[in-house]
Image (cartoon, rainbow, N blue to C red):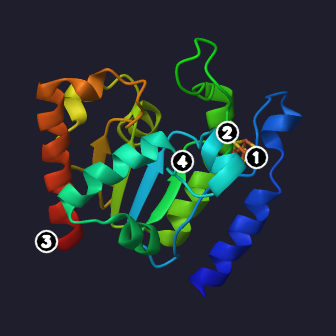
């Protein structure tokens, strides 16, 4: 039943024109994946060019390659994770490149607000026990704004009856993830994810 409802939700999502109607030059289609039965939901920032133009799968570009080098430390190989976990994002279409030329443009607050209802619907339907919040926008969505990565990565939060485990965005544009002290926090976060997944 939930699988049918999720398929209907995805059908509605693919028809979404909210950002275009508001004048944002985003590029679809919206990118999400995973089964309605998922216990674990991963929420990123937004898909990139590779995801939208080539693979139509979340986290399948360079950032995804790094993410899937992290996840085996939590016991998740890529194929199993993609098959069993739900992957979505704060905004679901490609926001375009960053003007600086490094990485993708972060979706504006208005775009985040326009897309928020879709994420809310996904959470309500799938009802995951564990949410992995990847990157500053996803972390702000679940923990509130203004939280520094160093204060939240490595901690398991309990929110609305779910475990929420923050991870930094695995983008190559992030200097944060390269620092040894921060890599230790990432390992701690992955240990929490392992315990929440298999414990
Ligand atoms: S980013 Fe979200 S709200 Fe904007 S057009 Fe895509 S699905 Fe719709």
Q: Nearer the viewer, residue 93 or 17?
A: 93
Marking on residue 147? none
Q: Which residue is mark 4?
A: 89
Circles 4 and 2: CB distance less than 8 Å?
no
Instruction: Point out the frontmost of discs 3 and 1.
Output: 1
Counting residues from the start of the chain, the first of labels 4 and 2 encountered is 4
Up-down: is 140 above or below 7? Answer: above
Q: Position of residue 8 (x, y in %)?
A: 73, 73
Q: Which residue is mark 3?
A: 199
- With 71 as the anchor, is 88 left or right in this view? right
Marking on residue 28? 1
Q: Which residue is mark 2?
A: 94
Q: Position of residue 160 (x, y in %)?
A: 35, 56
Q: Quadrant of residue 113?
A: top right
Circles 2 and 1: CB distance less than 8 Å?
yes
Whether the residue carrying mark 1 lies under 8 Å from ligand 1 is answered with yes
Residue 182 visible? The answer is yes
Q: Nearer the viewer, residue 186 or 15?
A: 186
- Please rate how many residues cluster around mark 1, counting C-alpha atoms within 10 Å: few if below 14, some from 14 to 19, many from 20: many
**Real-space CA distance between mark 3 and mark 1, rounded to the nearest whole angstrom:** 38 Å
**Real-space CA distance between mark 3 and mark 2, rounded to the nearest whole angstrom:** 35 Å
Q: Residue at x 14, y 54 (%)?
A: 191
Q: Residue at x 62, y 49 (%)?
A: 51
Counting residues from the start of the chain, the first of labels 2 and 1 encountered is 1
Counting residues from the start of the chain, the first of labels 3 and 4 encountered is 4
Please, which residue is most extreme toward the top here?
100
Q: Quadrant of ligand 1?
A: top right
Circles 3 and 1: CB distance less than 8 Å?
no
- With 196 as the anchor, is 84 left or right in this view? right
């Amino acid at each position: 039943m939930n699988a049918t409802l999720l398929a209907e939700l995805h059908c509605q999502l693919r028809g979404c024109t909210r950002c275009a109607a508001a004048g944002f030059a985003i590029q679809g289609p919206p990118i999400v994946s995973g089964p309605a039965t998922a216990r674990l939901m991963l929420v990123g920032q937004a898909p990139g060019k590779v995801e939208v133009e080539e693979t139509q799968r979340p986290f399948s570009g360079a950032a995804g390659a790094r993410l899937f080098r992290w996840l085996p430390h939590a016991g998740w190989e890529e194929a199993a994770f993609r098959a069993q976990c739900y992957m979505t994002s704060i905004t679901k279409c490609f926001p375009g490149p960053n003007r600086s030329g490094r990485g993708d443009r972060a979706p504006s607050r208005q775009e985040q607000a326009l897309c928020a209802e879709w994420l809310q619907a996904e959470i309500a339907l799938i009802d995951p026990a564990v949410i992995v919040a990847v990157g500053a926008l996803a972390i702000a969505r679940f923990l509130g704004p203004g939280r520094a990565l160093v204060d939240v990565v490595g901690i398991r939060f309990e929110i609305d009856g779910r475990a929420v485990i923050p991870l930094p965005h695995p983008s190559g544009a992030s200097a944060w993830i390269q620092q040894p002290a921060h890599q230790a926090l990432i390992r701690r976060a992955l240990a929490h994810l392992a315990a929440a997944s298999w414990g």
